Each structure stands twice: as structure tokens, then as C-alpha cells.
Image (tube, rainbow, N blue to C red):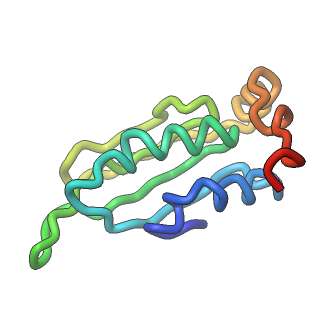
Amino acid sequence: MAIFYDFEFSELVRAYALAGAEVVLIPTANMQPYTGIAIRFVPARAEENEIYVAYANRVESEGNFEYYGLSCVVGPDGLDHARAAVEEEIIYASLPKEHLTNIRKSLSHLNDRSPELYS
């Protein structure tokens, strides 16, 4: 699990993936104008780490904050398995182990890393 702002740092999800995690769950309350987190960061984190990411974002407004929704479940290939609109809705997706295994065989981001270059 990762919360809100923590997820925006790539190292956290990478550490989870290297430790063997298959999915990261992210409950959040992200607001305008940061829609890029749901649209760009979530798919990128999923694909670069060959992991499922489930991002559950708040909807509506409170005080000066306007929460934008866009909750999603993204596969290890960076593709949406489910995505909500900018409104309250329930989404769900299957997270097949076989899909994860196949993606991990075809992608090589984790295996091709060269940590000795940046340690």
C-alpha cells in the first residue's frame, strides 16, 4: 500500500516490486490541478515496475479543494483495466496472475536495471 503523495516518488513502487509485490493499492485524495498523477504517473509506475496499481481517488470538493476522481486499476503493461470518470463511481477489475507473469516475461525493466550505476 502507498498513500497519496508517497506514490509520486518512483522509488517506493520500485522497492515494492523488487520485494515481490504484485499489486500496489493507493487510497488518495488528490485534487486539481494534479490530474497528471492519475493519467500519467499511475500507468508509468505500473509498467516500469511490471506491477498492478489500483488508484482510488476522492471525488467532489471540500473547502478550496476540488478532488478529481479518475480512480483506476492499471495492469503491469501500463494499460487501464478499469478507469472512473470525474465523478463518483465504483470500478473493479480482475488482476490475473497469468497476465502478470506474461508481462514480466515480455518486459524487462526490472531485469535490465543497472543499480551499480546509480548506487
Q: Position of residue 14 (x, y in %)?
A: 70, 53
Residue sitting farthest toward the bottom: 63
Question: Depth check: 106 or 23 in front?
Answer: 106
Residue sitting farthest toward the top: 106
Q: On screen, 98 above or below 38?
A: above
Q: On screen, 41 above or below 8?
A: above
Q: On screen, 1 above or below 109?
A: below
Q: Position of residue 43 (x, y in %)?
A: 50, 38
Q: Residue at x 82, y 38 (%)?
A: 113
24 displayed left or right of 39: right
Q: Residue at x 44, y 66 (%)?
A: 27
Residue sitting farthest toward the left: 63
117 displayed left or right of 34: right
Q: Quadrant of the C terminus?
A: bottom right
Q: Position of residue 68 (x, y in %)?
A: 22, 55
Q: Residue at x 83, y 32 (%)?
A: 112
Count of numbered circles in the view: 0
Q: Quadrant of the N terminus?
A: bottom right
Q: Position of residue 45 (x, y in %)?
A: 57, 45
Residue sitting farthest toward the right: 116
Question: Depth check: 119 or 16 in front?
Answer: 119
Quarter assignment of residue 33: bottom left
